Image (cartoon, grey):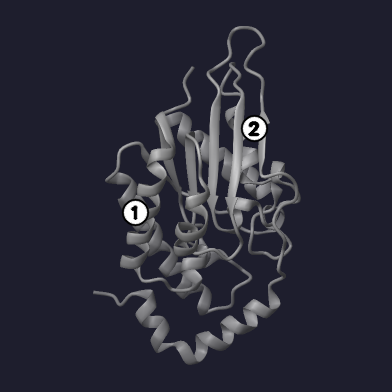
Amino acid sequence: MRPSARVVALAAAPVLLPQGRRARRSIPRLPDAAGPRTGVVGDGDGDGRGCAPLSILVIGESTAVGVGATTQAEALAGQLARRLSSPGDAARTVSWAALGRSGAAARHVLRDHVPLVTGEWDVVVLVLGVNDTLGLTPVPRWRATVEEILDALEPHVADGGGLVLAGLPAVSRFVALPQPTRALLGRHARALDDELAAIAGGRERTLHVRTPVLGSGPMLAVDRFHPSALGYAVWAAELARALAAEWLLHP
């Protein structure tokens, strides 16, 4: 059996710790996307072909609150709402909200943000894992915390709605991180993402959606770490496609 990324990291700490400190100093710290963290898009009342209204909550780490985008409308929640407001030839009104903070690991979201969720939502998207990757959170602890988060969020999912576990990005492609740190963290990110897929497979109305590889260039923000507005658009399109294919987005 191959050793886990965490075990390898402990053995390689004399190399990885200095690399990690240099990377943190060199990566620019970007603010959350500006603007209100709630909004409404679309109009399903026009010609009688409209779909039922939809509500979306995106909760989690920095990408949940749009770090790398200029405004919340360009961030994940706003872009996903726009994608879902016009499924096919129909139209619908979509209300959305974003909740979280930069640097949050799963345990922080469970402690600080899940208790703030109120009401019912048709789609709840959980965006987590990069900070748990950077912190080398052990896989069993990661799984247990994610399960706790989902258990707490389920009462806030409307009948007919569902939970979406956004897959971890390809950390092994994060050019802002040096090697061998990048390869090691990429391996740990894959292990955490595999756990998300397993969790979704064991729960009803829970969907795991792999996050597209954003590569580099215009799909990344200036820190070469977070998505840009274009990157969020690509990500939102993949989430919308998966939702339409699996459940929920029918008239």
Query: Of the residues tagged 2 and 1, which is closer to the observer?
Result: 1
Name the residue at the bottom extreme: 14
* Quadrant of residue 76 within the rendered picture: top right
Q: What's the residue type where badge 1 is placed? A: Glu
| Front residue (pair 212, 154) | 154
**Residue 212: assigned label:** none
Q: Residue drawn 53% across and 19% down? A: 52
Assign the N terminus to one quadrant of the image: bottom left
Name the residue at the top extreme: 48
The local crowd at label 1, few if under 14, some if 14 to 19, many if 20 or more residues have their Cα within 10 Å, is some
Residue 88 drawn at (x, y percent): 57, 20
165 shown above or below 43: below
Per the image, the residue denoted by label 1 is: 147
Name the residue at the left extreme: 1
Q: Secondary structure at mark 2?
A: helix
Asked whether, in this view, residue 139 is left or right of residue 69, the answer is left
Q: Is residue 80 visible?
A: no
Q: How many marks?
A: 2
| Front residue (pair 28, 57) | 57
* Quadrant of residue 178 within the rendered picture: bottom right
Query: Mark 2 or mark 1, which has the lower sequence index?
Result: 2
Residue 34 drawn at (x, y percent): 75, 50
Per the image, the residue denoted by label 2 is: 82
Q: Residue drawn 64% across and 39% down? A: 79
The local crowd at label 2, few if under 14, some if 14 to 19, many if 20 or more residues have their Cα within 10 Å, is many
Q: Residue drawn 51% across and 34% down? A: 241
Q: Is residue 71 visible?
A: yes
Q: Residue drawn 44% across and 87% down? A: 12
Q: CA distance from mark 2 to mark 1?
A: 29 Å
Residue 206 drawn at (x, y percent): 37, 41
Q: What's the residue type where badge 2 is placed? A: Arg
